Amino acid sequence: MPALVGFEIVEQEKHRCVIKNITESSLEFESLLVRVFNLLESMGEEMAEHLEKGERDLEYISFIDHTVNRFIGFCLRSLNKYGFKEHYKTPSMYAILQGLEHLGDLYKDLAEEIFLGRMKLHSDFLRGFREVNHLLKEYRHLFYHFDDQKAVAFVHHYREVRKRIQKLPSSQLTFLTSALLRVIITELLSNQLTLR
């Protein structure tokens, strides 16, 4: 698709997309951040659904990742230009955005490995992958509604998922899924704690 200056794909699935003008003043940093979370969750959910059906055609995931990267680029430029609403939190927010971009890249890399047939999917992989996706949703909730007890519960859930994934047969899938987990806990949650 040729570039349309100021327009971005804000929602994308395998057979449809929604395009909006992001230069309008009504679409600010917070709105784009919500869209980034939506797109990342969509990437994970759609990959899981396609894998459950035995479909390996996940090439479109790279297009979603491209949109995530563009939105995050816009958010990073906004932080550089204006800072976060509470300026002392700008560096942490910057790091969280980079973690979200890294997460999108990992989803894309995983989709490419599966699409190219370099991976043999293990029966337990899909369950572990869904748990990683659920952790992203938990993190999103924690991001917008932080609570100390929920953060502790999140870390415990993360550790349980990590243990289960580490029991899978050694492969790049296990590595990539573990990488997804590391991003969620180290790049996202650790910086979230500094936003408090």
Image (cartoon, rainbow, N blue to C red):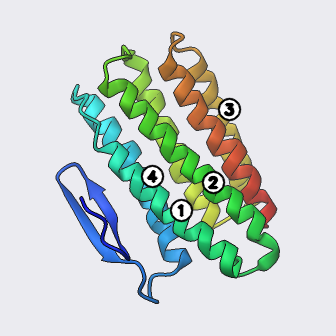
**Dot placed on the residue nearer the N-terminal end, 1 or 2:** 1
**Dot placed on the residue nearer the N-terminal end, 3 or 2:** 2
Residue 161 shows in this picture: no
Measured along the vertical axis of the image, is residue 37 above or below residue 160?
below
What amino acid type is highlighted by mark number 4?
A: Leu
Q: Quadrant of the N terminus?
A: bottom left
* Rendered residue at 53%/69% (across/down): 74
Measured along the vertical axis of the image, is residue 48 above or below residue 79?
above
Dot 3 lies on which element?
A: helix
Residue in front for this viewpoint, 73 or 183 = 73
Total marks placed: 4
What amino acid type is highlighted by mark number 1?
A: Ile
Residue 30: % across, % down: 54, 75
Which label sits on residue 72?
A: 1
Marks 1 and 2 in Cβ contact (< 8 Å): yes
Q: CA distance from mark 1 to mark 4?
A: 12 Å
Residue under circle 3? 159
For marks 2 and 4, give the one nearer the viewer: 2
Residue under circle 2? 98
Residue under circle 4? 40
